[in-house]
Image (cartoon, coloured by chain):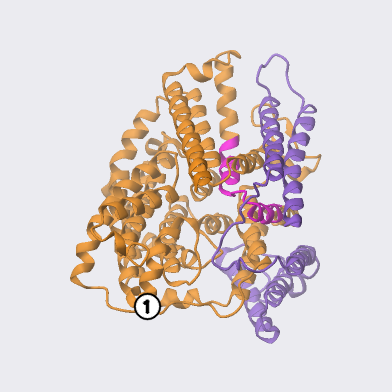
Chain colours: A orange, B purple
Amino acid sequence: MLLEGFATAAQPEYLLYALLGVTLGTAVGVLPGIGPAMTVALLLPLTYTLEPTAALIIFAGIYYGGMYGGSTTSILLNTPGESASIVTALEGNKMAKAGRGAAALATAAIGSFVAGTIATVLLTLLAPAIADLAVQLGPADYVALMVVAFTTVAALLGSSPVRGLASLGLGLFIGLVGTDTLTGQQRFTLGVATMSDGIDVVVVAVGVFAVGEALYVASRLRHGPIEVIPVGGKWMTRGFWARSWKPWLRGTFIGFPIGTVPAGGADVSTFLSYAAEKKLSKRPEEFGKGAIEGVAGPEAANNAAAAGVLVPLLTLGLPTTATAAVIVAAFQSYGIQPGPLLFTNNGPMVWALIASLYIGNVMLLVLNLPLVKIWVKVLQIPRPYLYAGILLFAALGTYAVNFVVDDLIVLLVIGLIGFFMRRHGYPVAPLVVGLILGPMAEEQVRRTLQISEGDLSALVTSPFAAVAYGILVVLLTVAVVLRLRRKKTEVMV
Amino acid sequence: MIAAKVEEYAFGGLVAAVGVFTLVDATTIAGRDDNVVGPRAFPYAVGILLVVTGIAAIIATARGKLGQAEEAEDVDENVRTDWLTVAKLVAVLVAHLVLIDVIGWPVAAALLFFGAAWTLGATWWRALPIAVVLALLVQVVFAYGLGLSLPAGIFEGVPFLDG
């Protein structure tokens, strides 16, 4: 099956789409202010004319490419970076300042490649098996999975569970607007005709990511020259391989499982990998001053987690990060529902997609190792033009959905909400996940209760659902205990 | 500090208000009595979630637990919020959406890019040509590359620009 996928993905046309995807992905990963979630959302309306396989190959390239590009920025830019790669910045930045930038970039790129490839192999092996099991899940089981995903994305990650849940609620509310699929009733449309189709996912994602981010950065823009640390030193030394390969592998096996279960995405895995490397290192005193293990491990973990996220995405239709949520929306815009039946109904497409992940990883290694100098130039784009461009393409992408100006009004309102959310520590990822999973969750709840004729216990009596809720309770308890303990130590200090 | 707190109360209040609206407006959704879970049940749950979290955010703020502003590469943590810049950008976006149907997408887009870049500190004589070229380029790519025609406005009938 995979070989057939390779046969498809290796056609010149698809190779070009993959190259386009990984190049765009690296570019948006390098540039501050733009991320893969927003890029995929922006490109959605423009790819309606493409066939689904081609579009999804581009999106997969953007998804993987964004992970590679982000590390370049956090190593070379003299400012704190985004959360997923902030651990890389810790050591990578120090290495670059000490004139060992080339080694830091190389261990990040090769580590990402190693981790990305191993994790894609694991995805290839695991996904069909999980899909086979998932076919047997009933609506109540899906409700349980979604409740777990909602809770972990909104409450367990981030610093403020209350604000995460509020963000989730806002996303669920936006998802409610429109016509109810089961009864055809209008909900929350305020009598506006264009609202009866609901608020387009693209408009919300672009608003909250692009417009919200641009307004937020503009409100406190860092002026003056962009300080990029020059890339120094040689990377191909004996110590490089000897000190890097173990962290790469450890990072992979820390990152992949964490990405797979709906419990964290990339951030958690990079922190765990960093802690593991620090503990296992023979030279712990180097940590904080530019230890190569502290770049190699977390970067590998980051990429492996990104591939892991694709497992629940493809087999259960369950997105656990903002980018994954937007990719689900992309599938849906082509009338394809990711989930257990994906491998049976759209087999050739999924396998071509997975094959393109292998190919994309090789392309990314080339793009990010010998060609890294180009990305350093991209990093230096003057910020006024960068953010003006983001706003222009945000407006364009939104307008191109339906060619109505009303969508731009919605874009502006949602952009302003995203702006204030960033100011007050409300994470935006739960909003997007809630928006996309909310309607699915409602449908599954109602199907469960229709089958059980209103008996609420049906939601928890299925063995799978019961286990899922059990695990969730354990996770929440652990989180509360950890939080209380941290508070105690803070008081004592 | 006080301003940040006021704003934070306001946002928490907004979340709770959206929740109240959800609960109130949900009562007007016509539902069938024979079906236990009609189109109202889920909105009620979402409304309750919003009201509870909105109030909880207000309480957290009152107890001094302010939300942490997001960090980003281009954000300077040491400067105060520049509200004028934000207002100008919003005005530029509003102008863009009003002008699309009046003078066409290319001009409206050029104004959006130019206005935003200028607001953010670009030199105007450098930003202007970039804005014009970028807008025209996108117009041509859309019309001929993607087969989607953006409203040409004042360029209606002009070859290459009017898809």
* Residue A430 part of the magenta-drawn span: yes
Residue range of the region highlighted in magenta in the rendering: A414-438
B27 horizontally vs A25: left or right: right
Residue A292 location in percent, x, y? 30, 64
Residue A120 location in percent, x, y? 31, 49
Query: Hey, which residue is sitting farthest bottom in the picture?
Result: B125
Residue A181 location in percent, x, y? 64, 31
Residue linked to disc 1? A231
Within-10-Å neighbours for mark 1: few <14, some 14–19, many 20+ = many
Residue A125 location in percent, x, y? 28, 41
The reply to whether residue A383 is visible in this rendering is yes
Relative to residue A204, is residue B86 depicted above or below? below
Identify which residue is drawn at 59% across, 36% down.
A438
Q: Amino acid at mark 1?
A: Val
* Residue B151 part of the magenta-drawn span: no
Identify which residue is drawn at 58% across, 29% down.
A443
Q: Which residue is at the front of the view, B141 or B14? A: B14
Q: Which residue is at the front of the view, A417 or B61? A: B61
